[in-house]
Image (cartoon, rainbow, N blue to C red):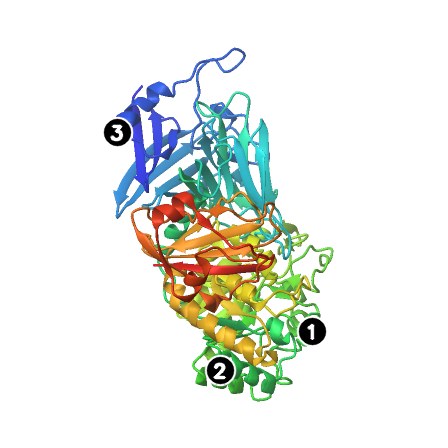
Amino acid sequence: MTSSVTVLRGGRVALVLAQSGDALPHVLHWGADLPDAAVGDLAVVTGRPVAHNQLDVAWQLSVLPTSGQGWLGTPAYAAHRTGDRSAPRWVASVESAEAAGVSTAVVRASADNAGVEVVLRFVLDEHGVLTVGAELTNTLTDGSVLDVDALRVLMPLPSRADEVLDLTGRWCRERSPQRRPLLDGTVLRTGRRGRTGHDATLLMVAGTPGFGFRSGEVWGVHVAWSGNHTHLVERLPEGAGAHAAVLGGGESLEPGEVRLRPGETYAAPPVVLVHSGEGLDGLTRSLVRHQRAQEGYRSSPRPLVLNTWEAVYFETDLDHLVRLADTAASVGVERFVLDDGWFGSRRDDTRGLGDWEVSPEVWPQGLAPLVDHVKGLGMEFGLWFEPEMVNLDSDVVREHPDWVVGPAAGPPLASRHQHVLDLANPDAFAHVLSSMSAVIEANGVDFVKWDHNRDLHEAVRADSSGTDRPAVHVQTLAAYRLLDELRQRHPDLEIESCSSGGARVDLGVLTRTDRVWSSDCNDALERVAIQRWTGLLVPPERMGTHVGPPRAHTTHRELDLSFRTLVALGGHAGLEWDLTTCTEAELGALREWSGLYRELRHLLHHGDAVRSDHDDDSLVIDGVLAPDASEAVFRVMCVATGRGVSPGLVPLPGLDPGRRYSLRVRPEAGLPQTVQVAPPAWWDEAVAHGIQVSGVALAGVGLSLPILAPGQGFLIHLT
């Protein structure tokens, strides 16, 4: 039987597929790149023995593993015809190509006995990011429907990957890490919220024991989808062919959610996989560079934002907003965003949602007086929408009660006084698109804050026959179409994905939007961890990071302005605060900070993120380096009292050991309160003028830091 090997390479990563005859190919290797000679040896060194009480022949993990090829774990493929023809016999072919630094392999597998065809597209880019797309087609012509249960991507892991990191969370505490050893069984994270979820794992990572931000070999997976999804790591006692375990994921489908008539195709969400021999920072570097290389990516300077929610809430008084805009412009704000309450009867959160017309009660002259004033000050104008939701107390629901997602038996439980608008209904879709587009066009809206404030409980929709059908899949696709249509009509429009904070953060929505709102929590102390772990996947320029008021709305904690502004420099910075209440000293501090943001955003938003593995959890150190390490910014943030008397020597990771740097502490980001008799010897000069120091000393030995009080920090700038 003839055999062939297909090799994809990119970003110091290799994927090696092997095929015998016309069988499904299997994965010989996914990980660090290998020389050609080593690739040629893989078939020999990965040949596995035949164990007692197992299959009578050695088997390998195919690219579409099921029990038919030996894999008894979670299957990559599951479909049937009302219980029939669920065991396909595959015949496959492989084609490969390389162009512009991107390597591609297309696997076409058909099973005549089941009447199905699957196409798998493996794309490995120059940054080492592997994207796998899968499509399933019903090829029978006898009229029978194919029910799709699963179409997942599963990739092998070596035995040295025996520790798992994933993320969980809740509203206002998104993306909290949790770690565990990889034992026999399945680490399965399934999101059934109808949106990505506050508890979504973002990335699921397996790696060598004790891997960190700067060390260890790691493999990660992300499902680029904003609906229901699964991520998993699974290990069986018999392994996964020559490998130890699998890592993967896909869309989570309800029974009957995807039913293919003859000739129809189901396109599964892309699954993004990434490998690094340099810890979690290596994963992030690959994923961020992958996003920045995408067509249409916003690389222009990210404007300093003021969003009005925590400034005025529903009190949208024109005179107050004009004063707020004046003050915002005076401190350097470049984009002014009017939040909830400008439309219909929306004076609180119980009514009016879905009526996307400017309220004549609040705005008798329309939004023009505010928009003209904002733009006259040289700022962009942004507006809040929640296109996928409605209040039952709204004109749109009174006129079209059938547009509310829910079973024929009656509407689901309300959440935040909201229900879901059925965007899969063409009339409802057209209504929202035309309403939003009219407001955007009439008011020259530059930016939309797109909210999605509830999980989808009992997410079913009654079809034309009155039969309840699962709705998450079609609702997610409809939301994507709505985003795409708006961008096509308004090419310069920027859109933020907000979902009661950070509940829709994924690469599916980020292919259609320009940034995400990281969390509804503007408490800077909480934000340190939220932003640190959101940054595992999301570039800083796509992560909304705002300075909130002195007393945090969600936690009631009070923090110094210097710490709030320092934390906000970790992303696309902004303000969420009634600046008309600020003292002159506060406004002066904000002017200095906004000037620093504009000075440094060329680096903050185009460099590579680095995070310290300092062993004292009370001290968080992260930074951004220019790709050639010629310039860097580090934030040092104290989040609790430390274990020791002083922090000791703390390395600044990623610096070039062959360079000498000018190190300055930038007082424009605020100077910290300390609990010490005297600072380190270098401190005063670094604040006043800067000091000269070698990269090898800073990165290899470390810097002695001041003893900070909790909720304090400072910014180091190196050139």
- Residue 202 image offset from top left, x and y in percent: 53, 48
Q: Is residue 62 above or below residue 374?
A: above
Q: Residues within 10 Å of mark 2 (few under 14, many from 20)?
A: many
Label 3 Cα neighbours within 10 Å, binned few <14 / some 14-19 / many ≥20? few
Q: Residue at x 51, y 69 (%)?
A: 574
In this view, the residue in front, 621 or 34, is 621
Q: Is residue 81 visible from the viewing direction of this image?
A: yes
Amino acid of disc 3: Asp
- Mark 1 against mark 2, which lies toward the viewer? 2
What is the C-alpha distance between the residues marked 1 and 3?
65 Å
Depth check, front residue: 60 or 530: 530
Q: Nearer the viewer, residue 356 or 515?
A: 515
**Picture residue at 43% right of the left edge, 57% below the top:** 682
* Of 635 and 19, the residue lying toward us: 635
Q: Which residue is mark 3?
A: 36
Query: Helix or strand or loop: what does disc 2 sit on?
Result: helix
Can residue 340 be seen? no
If the image is split into quadrants, where does the C terminus sit?
bottom left
User: What residue appears at the point 51 percent right and 66 percent down from the top-left corner?
Assistant: 670
Q: Position of residue 183 (x, y in %)?
A: 58, 28
Percent position (x, y) of residue 555?
Answer: 68, 61
Amino acid bearing label 2: Val
Earlier in the chain: of badge 1 and badge 3, it is 3
Mark 2 and mark 3 in contact (Cβ < 8 Å)? no
Q: Where is 75 relative to 271, above or below? A: above
Residue 348's tag is 1
Quadrant for the N terminus in the image: top left
Label 2: which residue? 374
Identify the secondary structure beneath mark 1: loop
